Image: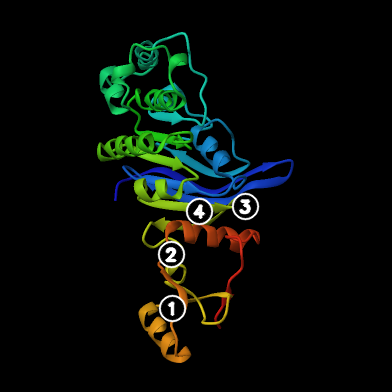
Amino acid sequence: MNENVVRVRNLRKEYSGRAVVDGLSFDIPGGETFALLGPNGAGKSTTVEILEGYRHPTSGEVQVLGADPATAGLTWKARIGVVLQGTGILPALTVRELLTQFAGFFPRPRRVDEVLAAVGMEEHAGMRVNKLSGGQQRRVDVALGVVGNPELLFLDEPTTGFDPQARRDFWTMIRGLSAEGTTILLTTHYLDEAERLADRVGILVEGRLRAIGPLDTVGGEDARTPIVRWIDPGDRRPREVRTDEPGRFVADLVARTGAEPSAVDIVRPSLEDIYLGLVAEHTGVPASVGALVTEA
């Protein structure tokens, strides 16, 4: 495994005595794409802003690219790229002019034409930014984040407002950056996006890291046990049960009732299911509308 690019130990951030980040510890090795997930107010943005150096922690230790972001200088800042949810760009400039200007701020920038191709904006390079669609402007935001050739790229809700095709094009670009060795920290509310892009995920709920790990193991074995959902003959109440042998359970169900149950569904929990389950467990807010009758 590569050397850790991000190292966080016991991170805590308080506002007016209330902890919005409470005892976070995790590492991100070089070359990894790590997705930090959580509901609104979970502490994601605060955590990322501390890692970027925009906020100072109340306590704990943070190392990013071997330095403390709170005190790191311009040389360190030139090694990171940041794509915020919204950026203050210069609408009077064309896309190419804007990227060329930003490239001049960095010691070893990417070629502007290369970046334009990477974000699919070659045909629009001569257009003024304020004439672009919302999705195209978002691609410019991403281009500004990568033009400095960062070792570590922060992506905060990068595809908000993208249409489906633009999202898929963006995913392809991010996979390309990852293949080149760029370390990426991604926050997103789209669980399918995390599944497509991330090597590992961390799930924040109420300021605490409730689960962390690779996509195929995060949440533990119990959370990944298949779920059988059905409605008994003559009964309108939906039921469900978790079982490691869903096929056998359905066969036994038919034998026991002597009739075919309706609306039989075997669900193998996805990242979204695990995420919603963790949020419900730690907040008391139901993960879905409509309670099911669970078999004992």
Q: CA distance from mark 4 to mark 1?
A: 25 Å
For the residues carrying marks 4 and 1, which lies nearer the camera in this image? 1
Residue 249 lies in quadrant: bottom left
For the residues carrying marks 3 and 2, which lies nearer the camera in this image? 2
Of the numbered discs 3 and 1, the one sitting upstream in the chain is: 3
Q: Secondary structure at mark 2?
A: loop
Query: What amino acid is at disc 4?
Result: Ile
Query: What amino acid is at disc 1?
Result: Thr
Q: Secondary structure at mark 4?
A: strand
> Disc 1 designates what residue?
243
* Residue farthest to the right, as pictured: 16
Query: What amino acid is at disc 3?
Result: Glu
Q: Is residue 177 above or below residue 93?
A: below
Q: Are marks 3 and 2 in contact (CB under 8 Å)?
A: no
| Numbered label attached to residue 203 | 4
| Numbered label attached to residue 234 | none
| Numbered label attached to residue 206 | 3
